[in-house]
Image (spheres, rainbow, N blue to C red):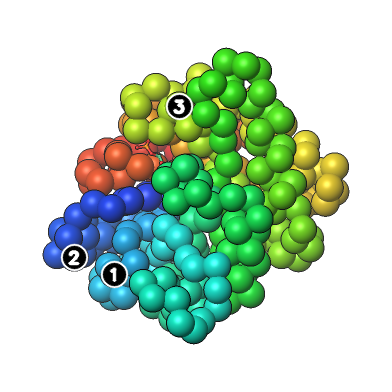
């Protein structure tokens, strides 16, 4: 059985004090809950990572970054490497979020480089894929996701794939209030799992967590997460409010 995962992507929101307050209250909430059907991950901005790590005291909530550099170290002003992320106590990093792909022009080749660096630094990678609206309307969504996975991910060995979580995030559903229907999510998640099976075999594909992202809320999470190939969610807007984030996790 795959364990469910719910990861909160805070994006560029909240100052340090607000972030620490939210993380502390989520940590406290889960410390009082019976163990662990769900892995909970918080992904604050880089600059909050070390401070947030300090308040995640109960070992029930893991920490992740939202990005990392495509280089290991050196003269890259303003960049933050995977190894630096790891040194804050983070275990995860999100790679290939659609906002990185579109606003910062990160392509499959670059994302593949970042993924390998992150894994070699000891992080686990939440690797995002997903089509824009036009691609879905043109019925190209499977082709797009296949390309993103083949070029971004499929150079990894099967051992390295053990450190991957895939997040399917249809771009038209991110921050828009639109969600994929549970059937659309299941269809794509099954497609992704089948691609992984073809490339890495069925053991690997059965173990692989595949998260859904895009306007998840407490009110729609249960139905989406109940689909057999949906192993949880990557949550944006609703991760910024304790009640909503906790509500989504409770829905699992
Ligand atoms: P959203 O964002 O939940 O606000 O749609 C999801 C994401 O971008 O990861």
Q: Nearer the viewer, residue 173 or 208?
A: 173
Tag 1 secondary structure: helix
Residue 201 in picture, x, y percent from top left: 85, 48
Residue 49 lies, with reference to residue 220, above or below; the image says: below
Is the CB of the residue bearing disc 3 within 8 angstroms of ligand 1? Answer: no
Residue 43 lies, with reference to residue 201, above or below; the image says: below
Q: Nearer the viewer, residue 64 or 113?
A: 113
Would you name the residue on which mark 1 appears?
Answer: 47
Would you name the residue on which mark 3 appears?
Answer: 172
Residue 145 in picture, x, y percent from top left: 66, 36
Residue 63 circle label: none
* Position of the C terminus by quadrant: top left
Q: Left of 241 or right of it: where is 39?
A: right
Q: CA distance from mark 1 to mark 3?
A: 29 Å
User: Mark 3 or 2, which is nearer the eye?
Assistant: 3
Check contact, mark 2 vs mark 1: CB within 8 A: yes
Tag 3 secondary structure: helix
Q: CA distance from mark 2 to mark 1?
A: 8 Å
> In which quadrant of this rendering is ligand 1 seen?
top left
């Amino acid at each position: 059985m795959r364990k469910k995962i719910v990861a909160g992507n805070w994006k560029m929101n909240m100052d340090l004090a607000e972030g620490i307050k939210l993380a502390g209250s989520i940590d406290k909430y889960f410390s009082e809950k019976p163990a662990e059907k769900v892995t909970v991950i918080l992904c604050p901005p880089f600059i909050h990572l070390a401070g947030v790590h300090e308040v995640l005291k109960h070992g029930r909530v893991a920490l992740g970054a939202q990005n990392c550099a495509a280089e290991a170290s050196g003269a890259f002003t303003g960049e933050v490497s995977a190894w630096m992320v790891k040194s804050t106590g983070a275990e995860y990093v999100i790679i290939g979020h659609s906002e990185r792909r579109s606003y910062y022009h990160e392509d499959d080749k670059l994302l593949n480089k970042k993924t390998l660096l992150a894994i070699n630094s000891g992080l686990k990678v939440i690797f995002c894929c997903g089509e824009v609206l036009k691609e879905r309307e043109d019925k190209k969504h499977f082709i797009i996701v296949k390309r993103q996975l083949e070029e971004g991910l499929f150079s990894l060995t099967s051992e390295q794939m053990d450190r991957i979580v895939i997040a399917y995030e249809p771009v038209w559903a991110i921050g828009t209030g639109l969600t994929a229907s549970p059937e659309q999510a299941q269809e794509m998640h099954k497609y992704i799992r089948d691609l992984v099976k073809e490339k890495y075999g069925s053991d690997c594909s059965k173990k692989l967590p595949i998260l859904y992202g895009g306007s998840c809320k407490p009110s729609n999470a249960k139905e989406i997460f109940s689909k057999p190939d949906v192993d949880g969610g990557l949550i944006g807007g609703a991760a910024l409010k304790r009640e909503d984030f906790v509500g989504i996790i409770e829905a699992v």
